[in-house]
Image (cartoon, grey):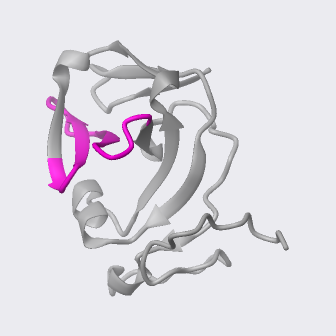
Amino acid sequence: MLHGSCLCQGVAFEIDGTVIDLLYCHCSMCRKAHGSAFRARGKVKASEFRWVRGEELVRYFESSAGQHRSFCSVCGSSLITRFDEKPRVLGLALGVLDDDPVNRPICHVHVGSKAPWHEITDGLPQFEQNPTAPVPPQGAA
């Protein structure tokens, strides 16, 4: 069981499953939504996610057609993203996890629009856009 919460602790959630497809997204929307050089994110099954408290504080913003980013209406912490075309999957902002998701990010996406002041210094694969095929873990054949 993984736990997560917002900055003010008004919103909390649990994940009874695994966070998968962890990556760093450098697109301008993620940079603006997180106030940072990139967004660290993963995916969880919607059926394995549940609000523990504060669901009434959660607000949604449709940042792209069919993509609804959520945040705490009190402190502004980014939480999850719902996808109209994939209702069984949620995007998860990794920064709000209180526990170690065990898996680690495997790549950087949308580096074609990364912040010009940020230098990527790790050895993870980098993609100009978001690859359409799953990316194998580093070192996999």
Residue at x 68%, y 47% (from the top left corner): 103
Q: Which corner quadrant of the image does residue 136 belong to?
A: bottom right
Nearer to us in this view, 131 or 49:
131
Magenta includes 29?
A: no
Q: Image quadrant for the N terminus?
A: top right
For residue 42, side relative to residue 78 (left or right): right
Residue at (23%, 44%) from the top-left corner? 68
Pinpoint residue 8: horizontal percent, then vertical percent. Answer: 27, 27
Q: Is residue 78 left or right of residue 1?
A: left
121 over 76 or under it: above or below: below
Q: Position of residue 34 (x, y in %)?
A: 29, 55
Q: Nearer the viewer, residue 97 or 69?
A: 69
Please state the horizontal and vertical placement of residue 66, each as a whole percent of the image. 22, 50
Q: In the displayed image of the protein, which residue is found farthest to the top?
A: 53
At horizontal 14% and vertical 31% (from top left) the residue drawn is 73
51 left or right of 71 in image:
right
